[in-house]
Structures are given as C-alpha cells and as structure tokens.
Image (spheres, helix red, strand yellow):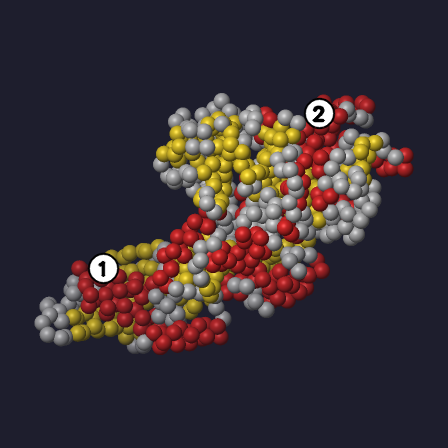
C-alpha cells in the first residue's frame, strides 16, 4: 500500500458508551473505504474489532482496536475504544496518540455519564471533539432533545452540521447545513442521493447554516472580517474555520449516522478527510525531558510504543506511533528506557487482526510490528541521532481491588508471570505483592475489569485462581506515655543469652523538644540523651530512637540490635500486626552479662519491651481515608448520599457539573471495597467516581475492638 506523508495523515479516536455502536461504525467505515469486503456483525463474532475470545464471551469491547482508512488521498488512523468505564485506560491511551475524538451518542439514550467521562478526558488533553449521534432509526430517538442536552452539558460550542429529517424507524434522510444539501438513502444505505434542500426545510437549514458559519468565522480574524462584511463564507473558508475551531476546541460539530444501515457514514468520512486537523495542526508533543518533538519526517527517528496485544500463534504485537523521522523495515534502533538494541523486521498498517505490510512510515503515522525482543508498553525506540523518551500517558487511579491467589500453590509463579504479561496489554491492571498485607493484590477500574482478568487467566492461561477481600493497610500508633522493661534470658549449656532493656515510649509529633525528665507514679526518671536517630518510615510517619543509657549499663555496640528489635515490632504492630508509626523511643537503662550478652539477646529484649509499653500507651489504630468524587445524575443523588452515609463517609460538598451532580466526600478505604458495584447498582450504571488517598485517621472504638479481637483469633489459629 501507499506510504503516506505526514501532511496526509490524521489520527482519530472513537469513544462512546457501551451500546452506542462503535464496533458497528468501525465495520461500516472499513467497508466504505474498501479495507473489508463484507461487514461483520457482533452477534456473529466476526467483526474487525472485538476479536479476542474474552470479548466474544462477554459481548463487550475489552481492548482498543487500531485500524486505518484510506480516503481521498488521506490516511485516517482510527482507534476504536471500549465504552465501559472499567476499560478507561484503553481510551486514555488512544486519546494520547490521536488528534481528534469522535464521541458516539446512542440515539436511544442521548448523552450518558460515559459521555461526560470521555469529554473530560478530551478536555484534560486538549483534543478536538466531534459528536456523532447514532441509531437515528430507534423509535426512542429524539434528536432535538439530544442536541439540547449536549448544549446543556457542553455549552454553545455544540454546533449542528447535520440534522435528520425523520428520526425513528423511518429514518432515511438528513440535511447537511455545511454543504446545504439533502442526503437520502435506500433501504440498503451506502451511496446517498444528494438533492437540494426541500422548501419546507429551507428556513431551518438556513438558520443552522448561519450559526455554523458564524462559529467557524470566530476562529480566524480574516474570516471574521469577511463574515461581518458579507455574512457568508465559501465552502473552503468554512472548512478552514471549522478546522481551526476544532483544533482550539472552540466548537464541537454534531453529525448524524445510522451505522448499522450505512447511512451518513460516507459523508462523515468526507468530513474527517477534508476538515479535521492533521497531525501538524495540533500542539507539539514534549518528551520526558520537556523538549518539544515536532512531527517532522526529516528529523531523527523516534518511535513510541503505546500498546501491546498478545495474539495466538503470533505472540506480542507492538503498536507504535512515529513521533519524529521515518521508520523503515530493517532499521536498527535503541530502546531509550531499557538500553537494549532492537531491529525492526517488518512494519504493518493496522486493520484490527488484519495487517498490511509497508516498507516505511512517516512522522505522525501509527502502525505495528512483531517479534521485538525487549520492548514493553511505554518504551521509546530511537535511531542513532535521536535521544528522546516519552511518558505523557497518565492513567487513572484504581477503583477496585482484590487479593488473588492460584488455587494450586504450585502455579503461583506461573500466575505472576501471566499477570505481568497481561499488564502490558492493559496498564490499568496493577499488580502489587504486598509485604505488609502478605497478599498479592490486583487493582483495576471496576469489578468487570477484574472479572475479565480472572476469565483470561482461567481460559487463556489455564490457571485457576480465586479472589479474596484484600486486607486493609491499617496503621498503629500510641496516644500517651508508657514505660516497660524486659529481660531476655536463656541458658541451655555453654554460652547463654542475656539482655535486659528498659525503655519509655511516647507519641511523636514534629518539632517536639528532647526530653529531660519523665515521671511515672512517684518515681522520676532523668534523661541524658547521648544519641538520637530520626527514621522516616517507608510506610509513612516516623520513629525517633534515643539512647539515654548512663554508667555503661548497656554497651554502645548493642544499640543497633535494640533499634532492630524495635523496628521489627514496628513492622508488625502489637494490636493487629499492621505497621506502627509516629513513636519516640528512649532507651534509658538495662543490664548485660559479660559472657552471655549478644546482639540477638538485646534485639529480643527490645522487641518485647516495646510491645509491652505499646499496649500500655493508649494504642490506637489508624485507617486510610480517601477523597471521593462521584459524578451522578440528579435523580439518583439521594440514594447515593444515603449509601455513602452508611459507609461512614463524610460529605464535603456538592456542585453541578455539565448536567450532573458532583459529590465530594471522604471515606474509609474499607468502605470502598465494593463501592463500584454498589454505585452501578444504585444508578443503573449512570454514575462514575474517582478516588485519591487523603490521610490516616483514627478508627472508631468499636471497630478497633473488632480488629484487635480478629487479630488475636488469627494468632490463635496460627499457634
């Protein structure tokens, strides 16, 4: 196939809720441009998109699909993205490597919460947006109401380019107010009949045409001057104004299609080919060092790998975008992230699971290759004169977590290898081997996201796994002063073990002064601080360790062992086995034996003395608290708030945002365990949420007592 120049390439992402018809639109686009000879159907599991077994199993898109269309001398690289919020990582990846976004709207339901989410992604990345209203033949479709709701959500930048003459089951015609023509189709769709606008529609079409011309003119001073003089723009000027308006997000054009019946798709292709911005029209991307990297095919070659797919009989298929220069089959390149050398054996243009070999690709183009040795998702390959790396894709925080383990412990290593491989395909699957919780935890975007992971492990990798509730990373601390001493003595022939440690512990606060005296009952203890260590704990908080031993009661060489004993108990706190934090420890006295004392003896004495003191120092359990933002339809607000209050959440505020209510709250991590499932049930899948860690705070007394009892029972079972 033809090698396209940078100024002939456009990159487009297709987003939309599940059920909006993205896969069907993809089939029709490919059919219209001749990439496929027959359109597949989701029900027959023969579409270009959704070709993985897990997608056939669930009937949902799980992975994005990269394909291309050749139209009027232009190459359109298009990425069809899953609609479910659980697979948002695929959409975010696609948006980062494309330049224009088609947001598909289901004509039966209009804008949904997924529409809001997808629009926010485009807003954050500054990507142009075109709204595409599909399924106009639905008897529930109300085009006028859909446009009004789009305007309520996204403002007056929403501008109609087309409108249907008769939405519903009889839909077969639309008015295009850019070209001022009527398009109509026979029962099979395809090539339209193009006619003048009927007299009965002329006034409405003229009014919308003027609104479109005015919106386009606002994006260029010369066009604005002409508009003021003549109140009109010719077709080329109108296209130029719309292109600039798209690039600056000054307008969001609205188009109409019935993808299933191939009505309106050819006209959409014309608009995409003629009007949407080229790669060179968009802001220049910066590399990880902040250096701008223009899409220049004459510059040194740098290629960013944004996606990995593992396919049967092929292995890893690596998808890339040429950030600069020109890549050729046979090029030798260096991995900027891993330092390894790679040879690009073959280059392909993508069409789902179908691929077309090409000799080279220019800056801005998207393609794939196979049989790379050491390239992972997010890596950059450079030619000899390039020195770039890219890290511009930022994924959302996880929303749903489960502890995972292989049913057969002998398959644990195999399971971990499979999880690492699968994360290359979807970086929002996060795998954590928690030393603290003694669990392997998988994090994802929702229950369906992790259910998909489990299905793939069991069906593709043949590894049976189970999910469990993940433990909560509680923290332990103290609220008052306490003193304890402990003697470790063991004699069993030959050299024995002896160490005695006396210590005081108290809550640590920043900038607290060094102690001089402590009083317990009627006894006063004077401190003479000889050394002090402030340890920033890797799990948060501090340990301050002080040596106040006088008279040689404990030799200085045993102090590191005493500190090690304290740290061991901090790592497995006395209350629940959780990490302890924010404690000051003063070792003020002890005893040693000239023969039997050693590091082990003092380590064990310190560990037990610390545990005794901790339990007498008003011990408290802290739990992780998260900031929560919920985007929810107004009619569900009461139910959502009631559910949150039952989860010990504190409501922090409410705001209206784009036709939805945004609710802010603080909530314990324990209460977030199944929140994605509950929220979906309460709102019928119309709400979404984001979380971020806030702080550690005290758990209520009744919950603390329950946690301590549960830990004691767990220890009893281990014995």
Q: Decide which of 493, 107 is in the foreground and name it.
A: 107
Tell me what residue is drawn at x 21 percent, y 72 percent.
488
Tell me what residue is drawn at x 77 percent, y 47 percent.
137
**What residue did someone put label 2 on?**
221
Q: Nearer the viewer, mark 2 or mark 1?
A: 2
Label 2 SS: helix
The location of residue 671, given as percent across then percent down, is 53, 65
**Along the horizontal axis of the image, is 391 left or right of 72?**
left
The location of residue 89, given as percent across then percent down, is 54, 48
- Mark linked to residue 362: none
Q: Which residue in the rendered view is the most extreme toward the right?
A: 199
Q: Decide which of 684, 578 is in the foreground and name it.
A: 684
Q: Quadrant of the N terminus?
A: top right
The location of residue 376, given as percent across then percent down, is 43, 42
Q: For residue 496, which quarter of the picture?
A: bottom left
The location of residue 347, given as percent across then percent down, is 48, 32
Q: For residue 80, which quarter of the picture?
A: top right
Vertical side of 312 occupied by 466: above or below: below
**What residue did someone put label 1 on?**
560
Label 1 SS: helix
Specify which label sits upstream in the sequence, 2 or 1: 2
Tell me what residue is drawn at x 57 percent, y 38 percent.
351
């Amino acid at each position: 196939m033809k090698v396209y120049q940078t100024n002939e390439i456009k990159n487009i992402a297709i987003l939309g809720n599940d059920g909006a018809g993205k896969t069907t639109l993809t089939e029709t686009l490919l059919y219209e441009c001749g990439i496929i000879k027959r359109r597949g159907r989701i029900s027959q599991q023969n579409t270009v998109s959704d070709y993985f077994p897990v997608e056939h199993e669930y009937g949902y898109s799980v992975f994005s699909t990269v394909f291309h269309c050749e139209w009027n001398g232009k190459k359109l690289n298009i990425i069809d993205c899953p609609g479910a919020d659980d697979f948002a990582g695929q959409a975010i990846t696609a948006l980062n490597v494309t330049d224009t976004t088609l947001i598909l709207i289901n004509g039966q339901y209009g804008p949904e919460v997924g529409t809001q989410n997808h629009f926010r992604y485009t807003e954050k990345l500054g990507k142009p947006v075109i709204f595409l209203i599909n399924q106009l033949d639905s008897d529930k479709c109300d085009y006028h109401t859909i446009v009004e709701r789009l305007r309520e959500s996204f403002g007056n930048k929403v501008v109609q380019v087309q409108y249907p003459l008769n939405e519903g089951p009889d839909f077969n015609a639309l008015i295009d107010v850019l070209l001022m023509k009527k398009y109509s189709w026979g029962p099979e769709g395809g090539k339209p009949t193009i006619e003048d606008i009927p007299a009965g529609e002329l006034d409405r079409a003229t009014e919308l045409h003027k609104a479109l011309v005015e919106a386009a003119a606002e994006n260029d001073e010369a066009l604005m001057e002409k508009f003021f003089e003549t109140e009109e723009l010719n077709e080329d000027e109108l296209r130029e104004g719309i292109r600039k308006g798209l690039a600056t997000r000054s307008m969001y054009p609205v188009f109409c299609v019935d993808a299933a019946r191939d009505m309106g798709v050819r006209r959409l292709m014309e608009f995409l080919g003629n009007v949407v911005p080229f790669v060179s029209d968009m802001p220049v991307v910066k590399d990880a060092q902040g250096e701008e990297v223009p899409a220049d095919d004459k510059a040194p070659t740098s290629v960013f790998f944004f996606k990995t797919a593992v396919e049967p009989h092929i292995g890893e298929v690596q998808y890339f975008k040429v950030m600069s220069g020109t890549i050729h089959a046979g090029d030798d390149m260096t991995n900027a992230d891993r330092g390894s050398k790679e040879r690009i054996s073959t280059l392909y243009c993508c069409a789902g699971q179908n691929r077309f070999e090409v000799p080279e690709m220019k800056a801005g183009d998207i393609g794939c290759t196979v049989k790379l040795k050491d390239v992972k998702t997010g890596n950059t390959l450079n030619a000899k004169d390039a020195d770039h790396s890219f890290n511009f894709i930022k994924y959302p925080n996880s929303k749903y977590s489960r502890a995972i383990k292989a049913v057969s412990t002998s398959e644990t290593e195999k399971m971990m290898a499979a999880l690492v491989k699968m994360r290359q395909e979807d970086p929002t699957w996060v795998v954590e081997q928690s030393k603290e919780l003694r669990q392997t935890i998988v994090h994802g975007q929702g229950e369906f996201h992790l259910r998909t992971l489990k299905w793939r492990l069991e069906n593709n990798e043949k590894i049976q796994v189970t999910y469990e509730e993940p433990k909560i990373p509680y923290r332990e601390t103290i609220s008052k002063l306490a003193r304890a001493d402990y003697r470790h003595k063991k004699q069993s022939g030959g050299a024995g073990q002896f160490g005695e440690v006396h210590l005081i512990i108290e809550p640590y606060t920043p900038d607290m002064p060094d102690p001089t005296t402590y009083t317990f009952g009627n006894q006063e203890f004077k401190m003479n601080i000889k050394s002090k260590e402030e340890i920033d704990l890797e799990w948060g908080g501090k340990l301050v360790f002080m040596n106040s031993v006088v008279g040689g009661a404990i030799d200085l060489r045993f102090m590191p062992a005493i500190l090690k004993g304290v740290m061991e108990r901090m790592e497995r706190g006395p209350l629940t086995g959780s990490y302890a934090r924010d404690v000051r420890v003063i070792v003020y006295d002890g005893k040693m034996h000239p023969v039997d004392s050693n590091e082990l003896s003092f380590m064990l004495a310190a560990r037990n003395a610390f545990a005794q003191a901790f339990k007498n120092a008003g011990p408290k359990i802290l739990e992780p608290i998260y900031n929560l933002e919920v985007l929810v339809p107004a009619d569900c607000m009461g139910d959502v708030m009631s559910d949150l209050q039952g989860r010990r959440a504190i409501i922090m505020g409410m705001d209206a945002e784009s036709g939805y209510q945004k609710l802010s709250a603080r909530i314990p991590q324990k209460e977030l365990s199944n929140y994605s499932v509950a929220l979906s049930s309460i709102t019928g899948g119309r709400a979404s949420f984001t979380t971020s860690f806030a702080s550690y705070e005290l758990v209520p007394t009744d919950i603390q007592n329950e946690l301590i009892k549960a830990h004691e029972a767990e220890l009893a079972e281990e014995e």
